[in-house]
Image (tube, helix red, strand yellow):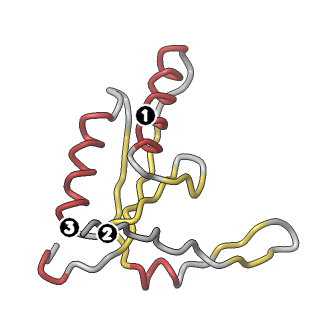
Amino acid sequence: MDTSKFKMGWMILAFDLPTKEADERKSYTTFRRFLIEDGFHMIQFSVYARGIISHARMQTHIRRIKMAIPAEGSIRVWYITEAQWQRSLIYHGKPAKEIPPEDIPQQIQFW
């Protein structure tokens, strides 16, 4: 990735974790809580998204994810720009009702 051309966008994370045994379900719950505490929001079951403001911040979150992934987990991470995110199509229910994608979270600035 060309970090000099990095634009604000979204980090999308999809995961598959086993949940047959009690210890696997506990690992799943622990990982899911980690994602939420790290600022991710569930957009589908096992698919989470987080607004990203810089390439360095994305690398920080990737390092955290790599440390938190359960032993039997499989994770895929994508980065998409805000423009790509806004072009996504979201449908709910039947008959299908189209809804707009979420806005990127506002950044708090300290002076």
Q: Which residue shows up at 29% across the image and 70% down it?
A: 53
In which quadrant of the rendered image does the N terminus lie? Answer: bottom left
* Mark 1: few/some/many CA within 10 Å (<14, 14-19, 20+): some
* Mark 3: few/some/many CA within 10 Å (<14, 14-19, 20+): some
Identify whether 13 is placed above or below 7.
Answer: above
CA–CA distance between discs 2 and 3? 18 Å
Identify whether 38 is placed above or below 10.
Answer: above
Location of mark 2 (residue): 109
Residue 28 horizontal/vertical position (percent): 48, 30
Task: Label 2: state its secondary structure.
Answer: loop
Location of mark 3 (residue): 55
* Between 27 and 57, the one nearer to me in the picture: 57
Where, by quadrant of the figure, is residue 94 drawn? bottom right
Q: Amino acid at mark 1?
A: Phe
2 or 3: mark nearer the eye: 2
Q: Amino acid at mark 2?
A: Gln
**Which mark is on residue 31?**
1
Task: Label 3: state its secondary structure.
Answer: helix
Task: Label 1: state its secondary structure.
Answer: helix
Residue 89 horizontal/vertical position (percent): 61, 78
CA–CA distance between discs 1 and 3? 23 Å
Residue 37 horizontal/vertical position (percent): 43, 42
